[in-house]
Structure formats: structure tokens, C-alpha cells
């Protein structure tokens, strides 16, 4: 017999009634004490903080997308090395951007070139939470610029060299460009429009990647003596495709988040133009390569989507839907042209196409703003700097500013990165040995195996201990 049947019903319900009574009493007291309506300014500030943080978290997730794209487009024996580089460029970059990068980018202007105060975030106080959210948002942008390079120099760069490079791009190279365009520097004063970073972020990473790839030289077996190139396929199109989807998803924080306001009604419009350009570029690249090669290329469609995303980033808040569609369609062809020029003409080995996607399409998208910036759209999205594009009555002024910005950033980012890689190479050598490259960087650099099922024989040949139960 159940023991509770002997107890009266009211004794069973009494604890429940008491608990509910206390809850209602507390709620009533709280309601009586808080009778004032919420402050509109405080509410707006909270909404903006939440929006900027959420958008920043989406951009941070793009680190995973870059890791998957690079891992998938490279060989299995190097995948662990690439995962570590994508982790450490964010970790090291966070420390450097905190110490000096943010100050160089947003400190008090010095001759339009760089900031001069706010080291270690000393300029941020505790009276406004938005400043800290803004720092986190800018940090993930800096990390994006840094991580682009890991794909261009994949499968042959020492980890130590990559860490040193990360220090310089996060603490100096990227922040200087950021100050020029976003921090009140000389290009900002001229009215350059790069709304979310086609040039500030993507071109900087692309140019640095080109410099690193040039100093490193191609992977073993990439080029033949007659100058022709060989395809070195990556180990997983699944990972590469997953990475592109993650990046596409993260871009909805990258571009709309650059409004820095959850109250800006154009957030949805910016997300729309971003998606339209990405879709158009994916289709464009797919069809163009299909016509050229006779088959639809998975790899080219994936890179096409990224090309459209990079290209629309500068003008996502200032162009019409038709212009966004046009930018995407052209970007799909631009990335194919750039890939051909980089590999066949310059003979540069870029395993994932980072230079073509980020430098090539970043420049293209920034220049298109000078042609297609629409004054009606600018008013709607609250872009109050710069002038309309050439096709909307603005003359050649804005196009000239955009071109000057593209050129200046290319010279600074490529030149400083090339000097850095060249000096490191002369001092101690930035490339692994031929034996280490052939074995794979997972084993030679880290003593580990990205895919244990593929690696026991190689490990055993090196005389190292094999995990118990693993066949040699």
C-alpha cells in the first residue's frame, strides 16, 4: 500500500501552496518597487551592446570556417598543423591587439597615420559597456586578417615563423591600415568607403599571404621544370564545404554587425545584399569553370561563394540589390582570373586560393564602391561619409579615393609582410626541410597525427613509439 494514501490531501498540497505564495509575494514586492519605466537611452545602449557582441561572436566562429576550409583543401598529413595555426593566430593576436593593436588603430590620431594612446586598453573605462563590446568586435576582425595567411603558406611554413608573423600583423600591420580607414586616419578623412573590410581586413590578409608564399616558394611537386603546374588535391571536400558554409554564416555578423547598432533598421538590408552577392558569385564561378573545363568544379564553386562575400563587404551598405548582384556575378569571374594569374603567371603556390579570394576580390569590391555607391541607399543605411559613385552622379572623386586606398594598403601590407618574411628567412629559415615537408608537418612539427588511421607506418619508420593496439 502506498504510504501517502494515509495522509490528508491538504497536507500533501500544503508545501506547494506555501512555495507558490512566497513566489507571488516576492514578485509583488519587486513590481511595487520598480514602477518607473525603463530608460530609453539605457535600453538603446543595451540593445547595441548585445547586437555588437552577437555579431562579434559570429565573426569569431569564422575562425572555425577558415580552419575547415584550409584543412579540407590541404593534405591529411598537415591538417593538425593548420588547426594549431588557426588557434594560435587568434590567441596570440588577442594578446597583441589588447596590448598595442587597438591603440594604434583607435588611439588619438598622429598625422593621419596611427593612434598614439590607449595602450593596454588604458583609454577604456567602466562607465560605458559598449567600449568593451566594440573592442571584442574589432579583435575578431583583426584575427580574421591574420588567419587568412595560414592558407596561403600552408604545408611548408614553420610554426615558429607563423607565430612571429602573427605578432606583427596583429600588433602593427593590420592596426595601421585600420587606423587609416576606420580610426580617423588620412583615408577616413578623404571619405574612403570600406563599410565592413574588403580592404581593411581581407586585402591585408591576402597581400600578407602573397608575400609569405613568395618568400617560401612552392610546395615540392607543385611546378614542373617547364613551368607547368600540378594539382595537389586536398584531403576532404567535405571539410572544405563545411568551412565555406560556416564562413557564409559568420558573414551575417561580419557585414550587418558593422552598423555597430542593433537599432539601425538597415541590418536586414545589409544581410540581404551580402547573401545575394555570395549566391551570385558561387553560381558565376561554377558556370564559368564548367564552360572552361567541361565539368562543374566543386572547389571553384566554394571559392566563388567566398569571392562574392569578400567583394560585397566594402559596399554592402551603399549599393542597390542590382549592384550587389552584379558585384557577385563579376566576382565569380574575378577569382578564376586571379587564380590563373597567381599560379600560371606569377608561379606562386597558394594551396587554398587565399590570395585570389581575399586580395583580388577585396580590391575589386572596394573599387566597385567608387562606381556603384548609391546616395539613396547611403541615406537609408546611415552611411554619412564618402560620396556617391561615378554611375550615380558622384564623378570620379570617390572612385579616386577608393583606388588610392587600395593602392596604399597593397603597398603597406605586402611590403611590410614581405620584409618580415624575408628577414626571418635570412636569419633562421622559415621553411621546414624537404624531408619534413614530405612526411607532413603534423609529425615533423608536432609529433602527432591528424588522422591516426593513416599514420602508424610513418611514425614507426621514424623510430617513435606507436600507440598500443595500433598496427605498425
Image: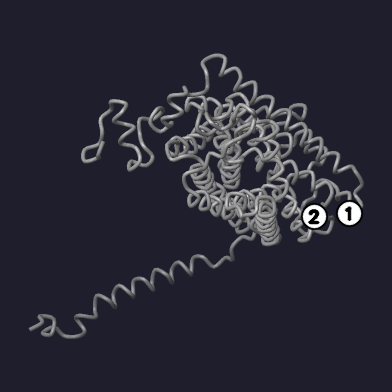
Question: Which x, y percent locates residue 78?
Answer: 45, 36
For this orientation, the residue located farthest to the top is: 427
Q: Which residue is mark 2?
A: 378
Question: Which x, y percent locates residue 133?
Answer: 57, 46
For this orientation, the residue located farthest to the front is: 226
**Is 193 or 311 nearer to us in this picture?**
311
**Is 371 or 306 nearer to us in this picture?**
306
- Residue 142: name its quadrant: top right
Q: Secondary structure at mark 1?
A: helix
Q: Is residue 181 left or right of residue 13?
A: right
Question: Which x, y percent locates residue 24?
Answer: 39, 73
Q: What residue lies at 68% left-to-right and 28% top-to-bottom?
A: 414
Front tag of 2 and 1: 1
* Residue 279 sits above or below residue 140 on the image: below
Q: Disc 2 versus disc 1: distance between alpha carbons?
A: 12 Å
Q: Which residue is mark 1?
A: 392
Amino acid at each position: 500500500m502506498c504510504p501517502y494514501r494515509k495522509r490528508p490531501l491538504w497536507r500533501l498540497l500544503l508545501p506547494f501552496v506555501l512555495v507558490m505564495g512566497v513566489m507571488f509575494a516576492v514578485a509583488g514586492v519587486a513590481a511595487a518597487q520598480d514602477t518607473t519605466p525603463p530608460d530609453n537611452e539605457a535600453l538603446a545602449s543595451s540593445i547595441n551592446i548585445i547586437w555588437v557582441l552577437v555579431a562579434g561572436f559570429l565573426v569569431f566562429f569564422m575562425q572555425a570556417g577558415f580552419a575547415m576550409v584550409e584543412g579540407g583543401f590541404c593534405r591529411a598529413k598537415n591538417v593538425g598543423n593548420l588547426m594549431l595555426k588557426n588557434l594560435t593566430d587568434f590567441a596570440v593576436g588577442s594578446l597583441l591587439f589588447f596590448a598595442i593593436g587597438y591603440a594604434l588603430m583607435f588611439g588619438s590620431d598622429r598625422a593621419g597615420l596611427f593612434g598614439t594612446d590607449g595602450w593596454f586598453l588604458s583609454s577604456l573605462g567602466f562607465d560605458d559597456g559598449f567600449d568593451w563590446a566594440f573592442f571584442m568586435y574589432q579583435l575578431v576582425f583583426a584575427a580574421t586578417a591574420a588567419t587568412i595567411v595560414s592558407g596561403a603558406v600552408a604545408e611548408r611554413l614553420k610554426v615558429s615563423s607563423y607565430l612571429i608573423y602573427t605578432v606583427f600583423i596583429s600588433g602593427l600591420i593590420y592596426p595601421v591600415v585600420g587606423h587609416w580607414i576606420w580610426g580617423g586616419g588620412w583615408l577616413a578623412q578623404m571619405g574612403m568607403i570600406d563599410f565592413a573590410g574588403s580592404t581593411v581586413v581581407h586585402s591585408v590578409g591576402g597581400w600578407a599571404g602573397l608575400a609569405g608564399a613568395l618568400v617560401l616558394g612552392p610546395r615540392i611537386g607543385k611546378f614542373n621544370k617547364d613551368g607547368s603546374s600540378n594539382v595537389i588535391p586536398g584531403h576532404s571536400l567535405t571539410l572544405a564545404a563545411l568551412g565555406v558554409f560556416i564562413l557564409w554564416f559568420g558573414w551575417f555578423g561580419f557585414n550587418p554587425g558593422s552598423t555597430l547598432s542593433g537599432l539601425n533598421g538597415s541590418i536586414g538590408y545589409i544581410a540581404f545584399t551580402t547573401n545575394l552577392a555570395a549566391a551570385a558569385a558561387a553560381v558565376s564561378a561554377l558556370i564559368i569553370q564548367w564552360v572552361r573545363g567541361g565539368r562543374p568544379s566543386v572547389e571553384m564553386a566554394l571559392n566563388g561563394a567566398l569571392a562574392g562575400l569578400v567583394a560585397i563587404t566594402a559596399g554592402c551598405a551603399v549599393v542597390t540589390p542590382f549592384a550587389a548582384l552584379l558585384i557577385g556575378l563579376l566576382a565569380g569571374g574575378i577569382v578564376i582570373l586571379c587564380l590563373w594569374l597567381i599560379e600560371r603567371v606569377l608561379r606562386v603556390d597558394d594551396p587554398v586560393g587565399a590570395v585570389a579570394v581575399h586580395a583580388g576580390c577585396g580590391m575589386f569590391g572596394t573599387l566597385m564602391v567608387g562606381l556603384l555607391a548609391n546616395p539613396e541607399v547611403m541615406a537609408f543605411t546611415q552611411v554619412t561619409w564618402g560620396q556617391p559613385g561615378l554611375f550615380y552622379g558622384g564623378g570620379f572623386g570617390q572612385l579616386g579615393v577608393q583606388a588610392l586606398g587600395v593602392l596604399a594598403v597593397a603597398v603597406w601590407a605586402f611590403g611590410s609582410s614581405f620584409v618580415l618574411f624575408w628577414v626571418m628567412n635570412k636569419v633562421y629559415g622559415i621553411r621546414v626541410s624537404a624531408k619534413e615537408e614530405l612526411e607532413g608537418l603534423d609529425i615533423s612539427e608536432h609529433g602527432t597525427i591528424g588522422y591516426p588511421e593513416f599514420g602508424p607506418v610513418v611514425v614507426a619508420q621514424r623510430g617513435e613509439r606507436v600507440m598500443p593496439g595500433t598496427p605498425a
